[in-house]
Amino acid sequence: ELSNTAWAFATLGFGYNGLESANSLNDYIYLTSNDPEEDKVLMTKALDAIAETSIPRLNVFKNQELNNLAWSLARLNQQETSKFVYEGIGNQFRQRRRRFSPQDIGTTLWSFATMEYFDEEIYRIICSRLTIDRGSRFKPQEVSNTVWALAKAQVIPKYPDAFDTTVVPPSMRLSLAEMSDDPVTLCFAAASNELIRRPSEFKTQETKDILWSFSKVGMRHPPLFKSVADHLVGAEPELHYQSRGFNEFSPQGLGNLAWSYAKQAQLVDEAIERIEGSGRTRSGRLNIYSTACIDIGESQIQRLFYGIAEAGLQVHDGLSKSKPQDMANTAWALATLGLFHKRFFDAAAVQVIQRMSSCLSNKPGYRSGERIHFNGQELANIVWAFATLNYPVPSMLEAIAPYILFICSSGDHSSYDVHSISMQFKRQEMANILWSCAVFGAYPRDLMRLMYVGLLGEGDQSDPELLSRIYNDGGLQMQAKMTLLYVQLLVDIEAPDINLALPPKFPEGWESASITSDADTNTASPATMISLSSSKTQKDVSSSLQRIGFAHIHEHVIGAEELLETHGAELSSSAHEILSIDMANLEGKIGIEVDGPSHFVTVIDDAVNKPNTRGYAKVLNGSLAWQYVWEGKQKMNGPTALKERLLGHFGWTLFHVPFWEWDSLNGSPEAEDKYTSEMLKKKRNDNIY
């Protein structure tokens, strides 16, 4: 009777009309009411009484009754009441004599995670009931709810590399028997097996929840993600008509799906460090691009993200139904993988501008609209995505600037300080916005000043240790400090009238603790302009330049002293390395940059009609790598364009050698020398060579 009463309240949504859930149990109805506040009071009193009566008697509840009670409290968002009830229900799961059904397992864990009741021991005990040999007994919703709850509670598998066929060589892969001491790893194994085995039985919400869960806990599973991609877009381009497509995905589902795939590629550096040790280094962006290609296939990953972008535009009315997080997740994912869908970003810019305008035209109530209000991370990731893909939309930045000023203002909405800014932004997010402004070459005065105050403080709030305590971030991280150096150089040259300056001797005195980024965030990081690794292509280009008599040095590094001596740019002497050039003729200030895949973005607006690319996986230095053979549309990305513009301000002329143009010469010295000679003649200074 107690369980049924709570279940009835929850089924009708009596006394509550706004529960937001992140997974598949959120398709609710709500009982209309003439007095919702009074109903809420009655509902809360009733559930408190049910909980008080139930807790000492949970041992006599049937399994289904425990399940119903747990679900009802989560459905009605009873945070305080649920804490004590869930502790008692968890104790019942500790008793091995009970035989819980798959529905009991999935729904109970979902309820715990939804109400943020996190007891890792209980989660591990419950999820141990979902194993590979029992997986076929679980319905898709029960499978997805179980792993979603584990990910939500951040119950991390002991063996995060168990299924990584890209990074882990066959000789190092563990058998299921060797992983038997960790029920969480085996639970994720069971979930992946079921989704691979019967994908058509899973709703799109359930599919994306499982993929999101793997990426959330930091577990890569290339075979699973490849299988789902094939299911969604077809294993081959000509079979796309047999694929499931994206029409059934909600806007949130599309955003989470995009985030999950991009996060899988981004996780590769952590996996490599675990497997091969910290001594192994790889190029960040290139590593992410190549990992996505090896995991899924270059053509397939493009077709997948084309489908995600198109569904947002066509199924969800030009992104108008998307929440800010949905747009931010998709934009971040596209930029992280170096994929540019122009129509998606045009629509996103329109939505951002319209929503910013709507917020500012009705300031007192702007927070009430979930499709209108952007938080700091969402704004930073959207702006960062546009900048990374080198797609400036001036009107969008003009709309964002006053919005940021408004949300960061203090109570009277007329001023701000570090504390009010820290309520909206992390410092890396502000660094991303500053970097994006530099890429765009646009520096809204008020926005720039606010970002500087947020990052560096002002007046009695400018002490590095105080700022570290306010943001609880361990100090200003190296990427943020490098961003500030680049931005300051450009501001001094391109916008000196806004009168911004770094603290004296910056970055001295702004040391940061070594901390790892929060696994729960997808906050992006701008790229450094220092790259000191020489590729084979770079060495071949250098050999050709030597043959034609072009004098140059390798890996020329420009530091603070050179900038001060040649251009009066005042930076701390501790800023030893600011910019680097692959090959440089110092006398004539001519630089040669060999541009690999990480310098470009791929345009995917026509990816569905694009023939399969001829790229392929290969073994390089004992590890899998991707050989790019590009045939589609590429354009220079934001970091590369920014570096060229900055070097241009310092008197350098840059020539670019795209890798595919050099590869097409097939190693012929005659063809290579002709290429380099004609390249230099385009902007050649006759006094140099």
Image (cartoon, rainbow, N blue to C red):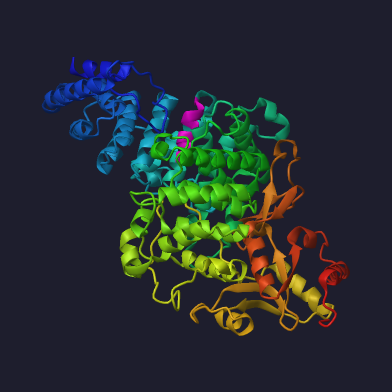
What residue is shown at x 41% (from left), y 23% (from top)?
27
Of residue 661 and residue 226, the one placed in the foreground of this image is 661
Magenta stretch: dominant secondary structure: helix
Of residue 499 and residue 618, the one placed in the foreground of this image is 499
- Quadrant including the C terminus: bottom right
Q: Tell me where residue 341 appears, x and y as whole percent.
A: 66, 43
**Left or right of 460: which side holds 222?**
right
Q: Tell me where residue 492 appears, x and y as whole percent.
A: 57, 71
What residue is shown at x 42% (from left), y 38% (from top)?
366
Number of numbered markers: 0
Q: Is residue 455 magenta?
A: no
**Left or right of 58: which side holds 258?**
right
**Left or right of 388: which side holds 217?**
left
User: Would residue 447 be seen by someone viewing this image from the given angle?
Assistant: yes
Of residue 165 and residue 18, the one placed in the foreground of this image is 18
What residue is shown at x 76% (from left), y 65% (from top)?
657
Of residue 111 and residue 331, the one placed in the foreground of this image is 331
Q: Quadrant of residue 300?
A: top right
499 shown above or below 83: below
**Which span of residues is magenta-colored?**
202-212
Q: Tell me where residue 148 appears, x and y as whole percent.
A: 39, 36
User: Would residue 133 be seen by someone viewing this image from the given angle?
Assistant: no
Q: Is residue 207 magenta?
A: yes
Q: Quadrant of residue 489?
A: bottom right
